[in-house]
C-alpha cells in the first residue's frame, strides 16, 4: 500500500499547487498510455461515461461495478502516474466502492451527490474519506455537487452558485479536499464559486467550445480542470472523420502517429 499512499499524496499536492491540475480523462489502457506519455501530464483521471461506452453500456452506473473496476485496475497497472476514478454516485455504497477502488490502485475519485438531501450526501463523503483512512491513504475525493446540472428549471445563476457553495462547504467540512461543480462554465459563476468555496478548492470540467482556457481558470483560483467524456468524443470524432474520408475515396490523415 506504500506505493498507493505515495501516489495519493502526490495527487493531493497537485490539487494545492499554484499551477492548475489539468486532467485529460482516459477510458482504457491505450488511451491512458498515450495521455500519460504526453509532456506535462502529471496524473490521470478515468471517465465513467467513456468506460461504460467502451463496453456498450449507457452512462449512469449501468456498467457492472466489477467490470468498471477491472478497467481501472488495468489502467493503474499500465502507467506510473496517480489515477483518480470516477465512480459516479457510489454504486449504492460509496464507502465500499471507494475501498474497492483503492484496492485496484485508484488514489482519488469523483462522487456525485445527485442533489440528494444534504445530510445523506455528507454521509457518503464521510464514508469515502473513512475508506481512505482505513487503507492508510490520503484519498483525494473530488466531491461532486450537481447544483448546476440538476438545478430546477428556471433557477438563476445566483441560486445555482449558492446551492453549490452550501453543499461544497459541507463536503469540505466532511473531509473532501476539493469540490467538483460540473456545468459551471461562465467566468462570473466560477469566480463566485471560488470565492464561496475557496481558492484551489473548486474543480470544473472543460466543455468544447464553451469553457474558459485552463490558464484563465488558474488565474481564477480553480484547483483542477478535467475533460470527462469529451476526450473520448474527440477521439471518436477523429475516427469518424477519417473513416468518412477513406470511404469517400481519400486516404488516412498524413499526420497520423504510431501511438500504439
Image: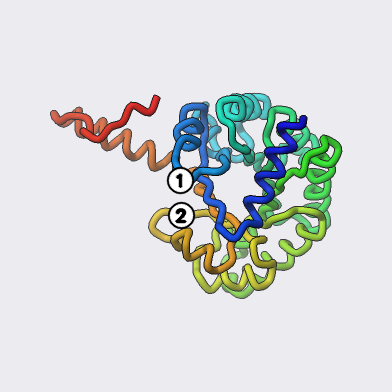
Hey, which quadrant is residue 48 in on the image?
A: top right
Is residue 118 or residue 99 the one in the foreground?
Answer: 99
Q: Earlier in the sequence, mark 1 or mark 2?
A: 2
- Work out whether 77 lies above or below 204: above
Residue 166 tag number: none
Residue shown at the point (72%, 40%) measured from the top left: 90
Looking at the rendered image, the quarter that the N terminus falls into is top right
Is residue 129 or residue 186 the one in the foreground?
Answer: 129
Q: What element carries label 2?
A: loop
Q: What element carries label 1?
A: helix
> On the picture, is 232 further left or further right than 197?
left
Residue farthest to the left, as pictured: 249
The percent coordinates of residue 164 (x first, y second) are 67, 64
| Callout 2 crowding tier (Cα within 10 Å): few <14, some 14–19, many ≥20 | some
Residue that numbered label 1 is attached to: 230
Looking at the rendered image, the quarter that the C terminus falls into is top left
The percent coordinates of residue 219 (x first, y second) are 52, 67
**Could you give the CA–CA distance between mark 1 and mark 2, rounded to whole angstroms?**
7 Å
Hey, which quadrant is residue 87 in on the image?
A: top right
Q: How many marks?
A: 2
The percent coordinates of residue 3 (x first, y second) are 71, 32
| Callout 1 crowding tier (Cα within 10 Å): few <14, some 14–19, many ≥20 | many
The percent coordinates of residue 240 (x first, y second) are 30, 35
Residue shown at the point (65%, 28%) measured from the top left: 69
Residue that numbered label 2 is attached to: 207
Is residue 19 or residue 49 the one in the foreground?
Answer: 19
The answer to whether the residues at label 1 and label 2 have Cβ atoms under 8 Å apart is: yes
Residue shown at the point (51%, 27%) measured from the top left: 29
- Work out whether 228 lies above or below 159: above
Amino acid at each position: 500500500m506504500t506505493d498507493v499512499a505515495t501516489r495519493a499524496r502526490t495527487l493531493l499536492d497537485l490539487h494545492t499547487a499554484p499551477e492548475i491540475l489539468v486532467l485529460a480523462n482516459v477510458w482504457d489502457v491505450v488511451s491512458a498510455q498515450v495521455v500519460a506519455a504526453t509532456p506535462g501530464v502529471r496524473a490521470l483521471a478515468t471517465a465513467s461515461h467513456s468506460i461504460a461506452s467502451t463496453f456498450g453500456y449507457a452512462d449512469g452506473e449501468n456498467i457492472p461495478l466489477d467490470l468498471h473496476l477491472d478497467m481501472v485496475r488495468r489502467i493503474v497497472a499500465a502507467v506510473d502516474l496517480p489515477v483518480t476514478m470516477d465512480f459516479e454516485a457510489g454504486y449504492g455504497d460509496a464507502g465500499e466502492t471507494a475501498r474497492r477502488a483503492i484496492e485496484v490502485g485508484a488514489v482519488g475519485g469523483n462522487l456525485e451527490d445527485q442533489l440528494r438531501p444534504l445530510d445523506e450526501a455528507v454521509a457518503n463523503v464521510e464514508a469515502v474519506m473513512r475508506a481512505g483512512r482505513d487503507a492508510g491513504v490520503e484519498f483525494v475525493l473530488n466531491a461532486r455537487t450537481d447544483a448546476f446540472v440538476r438545478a430546477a428549471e428556471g433557477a438563476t445563476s445566483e441560486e445555482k452558485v449558492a446551492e453549490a457553495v452550501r453543499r461544497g462547504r459541507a463536503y469540505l467540512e466532511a473531509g473532501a479536499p476539493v469540490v467538483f461543480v460540473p456545468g459551471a462554465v461562465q467566468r462570473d459563476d466560477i469566480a463566485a464559486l471560488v470565492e464561496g468555496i475557496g481558492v484551489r478548492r473548486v474543480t470544473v470540467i472543460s466543455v468544447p467550445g464553451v469553457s474558459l482556457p485552463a490558464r484563465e481558470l488558474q488565474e481564477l483560483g480553480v484547483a483542477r480542470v478535467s475533460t470527462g467524456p469529451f476526450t473520448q468524443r474527440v477521439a471518436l470524432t477523429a475516427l469518424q472523420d477519417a473513416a468518412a474520408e477513406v470511404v469517400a475515396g481519400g486516404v488516412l490523415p498524413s499526420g497520423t502517429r504510431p501511438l500504439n
